[in-house]
Image (spheres, rainbow, N blue to C red):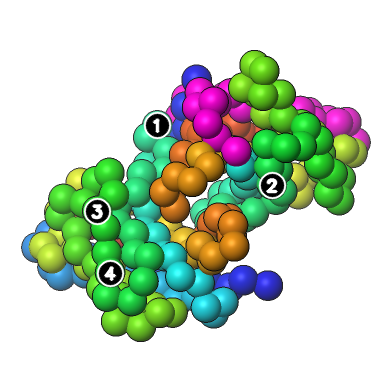
Amino acid sequence: DVKVTQSSRYLVKRTGEKVFLECVQDMDHENMFWYRQDPGLGLRLIYFSYDVKMKEKGDIPEGYSVSREKKERFSLILESASTNQTSMYLCASSDGRGGGETQYFGPGTRLLVL
Amino acid sequence: GESVGLHLPTLSVQEGDNSIINCAYSNSASDYFIWYKQESGKGPQFIIDIRSNMDKRQGQRVTVLLNKTVKHLSLQIAATQPGDSAVYFCAEKSAGGSYIPTFGRGTSLIVHP
C-alpha cells in the first residue's frame, strides 16, 4: 500500500514565523504535490514536483516555497506565516510512470496561524 | 456545479440503503476518473478509478458508472454503512495532459443508523 506521511497533524504558529511542513512517501513516486483545502474552495494546488530538485507553481504559490532534495520527501515552506494561511494542508504523490496518475494523499496538517 | 464545506451538497441515507453520488465534468478530453472519500479531519482516500474506455467498474460494495455522452460520473455504494459517512469527490484527468487532475468540490454523505 502507498503510504504518504506528513510531519504534523496539527500546528499552531504565530504571524511572521517560518513554517516547515514535511511530507514523505514510501512508494518511489516521481510526482509530489502540495494542496490546501478550505471550506467553499475545495482543493487548491500550491506547488508540485515531478522530479528531485524540480518544482512547478500551482494555482496559488504566493507566500509559499517548496524543496525536494530527495525523491521521497517534499517540503512546503511558509517564509512568513500570515493568518490567511490558516488551512488544511494536504500532500499527495503519484507514480507518473506507465499511466500511474492516481494521487495518494497524506493525512493532512491543520495549520492555525495566530 | 458543486461546493464544499458550508455549502456542500448533502446526501442523507439510512443504513442499509444504496447511495448514489453524482459528479459532472466539463472536459471532453478527460480519460481517467477517480473517486475519493474524505472523512472528517483526514486526507482523501482513493476508492476506485475508471478509464474512458469503460462505462462501469466495480469494487467492493462500490460501482462507478461513466457516461461520456453527458459527461457524468456516479459512485454507487451498496448497503451503505455509518462508516461510509464522509465527503466524496471525483477527479478527472486528460489524456496526455499534465500530472494534475481536476477535483470536484464534493458531496457530503450522511448515513443514519
Q: Nearer the viewer, mark 3 or mark 1?
A: 3
Q: Nearer the viewer, mark 4 or mark 2?
A: 4
Residue A62 in percent (x, y) is at: 16, 50
**Disc 1 chain ID:** A
Say yes or no: labels 3 and 1 on the same chain.
Answer: yes
Residue B6 in percent (x, y) is at: 45, 29
Which residue is under mark 1? A40
Q: Helix, strand, or loop for circle 1?
A: loop
Q: Helix, strand, or loop for circle 2?
A: strand
**Disc 2 chain ID:** B
Q: Residue at x 58, y 73 (%)?
A: A3
Which residue is under mark 2? B49
Which residue is under mark 3? A57
Identify which amino acid the numbered label 2 is placed on: Asp
Q: Residues within 10 Å of mark 4 (few under 14, many from 20)?
A: few
Residue A7 is labelled as none
Residue A54 in percent (x, y) is at: 28, 69
Q: Earlier in the sequence, mark 4 or mark 1?
A: 1
Q: Helix, strand, or loop for circle 4?
A: loop
Residue B74 in percent (x, y) is at: 71, 29
Q: Is residue B21 placed above or below B81 in the rendered structure? A: above
What whole-number distance in Å separates the C-alpha atoms at marks 4 and 2?
Answer: 28 Å
Q: Earlier in the sequence, mark 3 or mark 1?
A: 1
